[in-house]
Amino acid sequence: MRRKGRWSLWPSISLHLRTLFLNKRRAEKFVLDGLPSVSKATQEPPGNGTRPTRVSRPSGAMAAASPSVFLLMVNGQVESAQFPEYDDLYCKYCFVYGQDWAPTAGLEEGISQIASKSQDVRQALVWNFPIDVTFKSTNPYGWPQIVLSVYGPDVFGNDVVRGYGVVHVPFSPGRHKRTIPMFVPESTSTLQKFTSWFMGRRPEYTDPKVVAQGEGREVTRVRSQGFVTLLFNVVTKDMKKLGYDTGPVDTQGVLGPSLPQGNPQ
């Protein structure tokens, strides 16, 4: 009887043990679910006994602190010109730059309206044609140059070139004024000069950008003729971060006639 009663209690004991085991598993699962997630670096056991640290990637602000290119923003205008012998002229401009440079915004070339001489003593041709372009580059080699070409009618009404000119965009930020001397190619002989005048086909470059290069210029016969005045507003970005120092703002870099009193230099 005593042996039979002891075996009769076994089902209730096994049921009680199973209930305790299930409750323990549920408690462990609840605790694990409630813990915050950790990175892989935190879960790995340290090898030297020190506390593991979380590995973090550089933020966007840190990446922006080390730029790979710099920007050159140029705006201004082709202000005026002085050609005492000619009237009713218009101007074309284009930019020439190195292989490491690329425009990101604005226009690389443009053509102005036809302007007539003013009625005052200066007899200036006023265009006030806007310039607005932005470049990016990794180095200053091939710094942009602006090439100007001035055209006007001859006695037969044909558009002929009246002058070429080129100047570098100012290196230092700020406001700048540049007066560019213009020149035109000349015929090599008197006969060619008369023929080109009679046919209305004056000597000119097939590509005006050639005036920004030095190759072949020594064999070209030219004649000085007129001046063109430009205004530049230059802004640079991230040049000093890449190790290039353009110096202080050029407040004395104004060439040519001075501006009227009351205007900033």
Image (cartoon, rainbow, N blue to C red):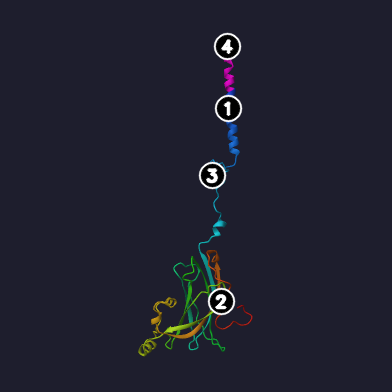
Q: Could you classify mark 3 by the number of other residues whose Cα lies within 10 Å: few (under 14), some (14-19), or many (20 or more)?
A: few
- Residue to which mark 2 is pinned: 176
Q: Nearer the viewer, mark 3 or mark 2?
A: 3
Tell me the mark number nearer the camera, choosing from 4 and 3: 3
Determine whether label 1 and label 3 are within 8 Å by CB: no
Residue 140: x and y, percent?
49, 69
The amino acid on which the numbered mark 2 sits, given as a three-letter code, is His
- Cα separation, mark 2 vs mark 4, equals 114 Å
Q: CA distance from mark 4 to mark 1?
A: 28 Å
Check if mark 2's residue and mark 4's residue have beta carbons within 8 Å.
no
**Residue 52 is inside the magenta segment:** no
Q: Is 236 displayed left or right of 215 in the figure?
A: right
Residue 41, which numbered label? 3
Q: What residue does disc 1 label?
A: 21
Rendered residue at 59%/14% (across/down): 6
Label 4 vs 3, first from the N-terminus:
4
Can you identify the residue that label 4 sits on?
3
- Residue at image location 57% in from the left, 12% down from the top: 4
What residue range appears in magenta?
Answer: 2-15
174 shown above or below 5: below
**Is 53 in front, or is 185?**
53
Q: Callout 1: helix, strand or loop?
A: helix
Real-space CA distance between mark 1 and mark 2, rounded to the nearest whole angstrom: 86 Å
Of tags 1 and 2, the one toward the viewer is: 2
Q: Residues within 10 Å of mark 1 (few under 14, many from 20)?
A: few
Considering only vertical position in the picture, is 84 above or below 65?
below
Does residue 144 sit above or below 12 in this rendering? below
* The disc label shown at residue 54, or none: none
